Image (cartoon, rainbow, N blue to C red):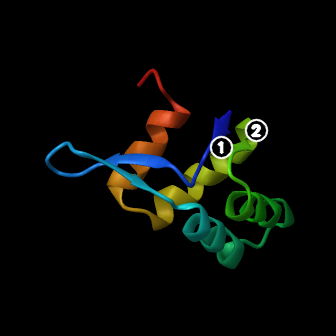
Amino acid sequence: MEINFKNIKTQNIEGKENVVDISKDLGNTIYNETQDIGELELARKIYLQEKIDLTNEEVEIVKKFLEKYYKAFIKEAIYKIINPKK
């Protein structure tokens, strides 16, 4: 699944669209909190690359960190990309 963490479309409380770049923040969060070498490499990809192609395993890693460290409006925006049918 291809995702661009530099261009995440969120909605404010009034339903207006905002575009946010969470690539640096998410990359740093994973990098600083993980004990796993594979997650460390994912953190670097998220931080450095424009668009990345996530494996199913990497999607689960992103979800794990979203659940622990991110506000609901960011989770909602990313889950719409990860699970577009929901």
Task: From the viewer's side, name the closer residue of 40 and 68.
Answer: 40
What element does badge 1 sit on? helix
Tell me where residue 54 appears, x and y as whole percent.
72, 41
| Residue 4 appears left or right of 75 | right
Task: From the viewer's side, name the closer residue of 60 and 1.
Answer: 1
Q: Residue at x 71, y 73 (%)?
A: 31
Residue at the right extreme, as displayed: 37
Quadrant where the N terminus lies?
A: top right
Amino acid at circle 1: Val
Tell me where residue 10 appears, x and y as whole percent.
35, 48
Tell me where residue 27 appears, x and y as whole percent.
65, 66
Residue 59: mark in rendering:
1
Tell me where residue 58 appears, x and y as whole percent.
72, 46
**Count of marks overlaid on the render:** 2
Query: How much space separates mark 1 and mark 2, taking CA atoms?
Result: 6 Å
Residue 39's image quarter?
bottom right
On screen, residue 80 above or below 43: above
CB contact under 8 Å: marks 1 and 2:
yes
Residue receiving disc 2? 55
